[in-house]
Image (cartoon, rainbow, N blue to C red):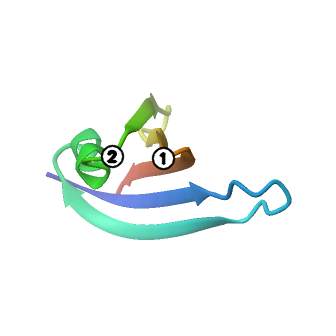
Amino acid sequence: MKEYEVIWEIFNKCPRNQMRDVFVEEVEIADPEAYVKQKFQGKDVSYEKTVLEDGTIIFDIQTSMIRQRCSFTEI
């Protein structure tokens, strides 16, 4: 298992409000993709996975017409 800092962002749908909810946690997991699937289990969800050059794994998520992002950076 690896330890990651996870940043979960929920983007605001209001056009005049650019603020977003941001949650930060440290987790020890084997598979970030399985973590995302479990977090949104039972919901109509789609996502795109991107791996940056520095190893950060980003999931751009669309669920219930709300755009979200989970970023995993290994600690």
Instruction: Place residue 16 in its image quadrant.
Output: bottom right
Task: Answer few, some or many: residues within 10 Å of disc 1's Cα (few below 14, many 20 plus, some between 14 and 19).
Answer: few
**Residues at marks 2 and 1 touching, judged by CB atoms closer than 8 Å:** yes
Q: Is residue 6 left or right of residue 9?
A: left
Query: Who's the residue at 39% across and 39% down the image?
Result: 45
User: Which kind of residue does numbered mark 2 sit on?
Assistant: Lys
Q: Secondary structure at mark 1?
A: loop
Near-viewer residue (24 or 54): 24
Mark carried by residue 7: none
> Where's residue 67, x and y in %?
57, 46
Query: Who's the residue at 50% across and 33% down the image?
Result: 52
- Mark closest to the chain's N terminus, 2 or 1: 2
Task: Answer few, some or many: residues within 10 Å of disc 2's Cα (few below 14, many 20 plus, some between 14 and 19).
Answer: few
User: Which kind of residue does numbered mark 1 sit on?
Assistant: Ser
> Where's residue 56, x and y in %?
44, 42
Q: Which residue is mark 2?
A: 43
Q: Is residue 25 left or right of residue 39?
A: right
Near-viewer residue (64 or 22): 64
> Where's residue 1, x and y in %?
13, 51
> Where's residue 37, x and y in %?
27, 43
Query: Who's the residue at 56% across and 58% down the image?
Result: 10
Q: Which residue is mark 1?
A: 64
Which quadrant holds the C terminus? bottom left
Q: Secondary structure at mark 2?
A: loop
Near-viewer residue (9 or 16): 16
Mark 2 and mark 1: span between their CA atoms? 8 Å
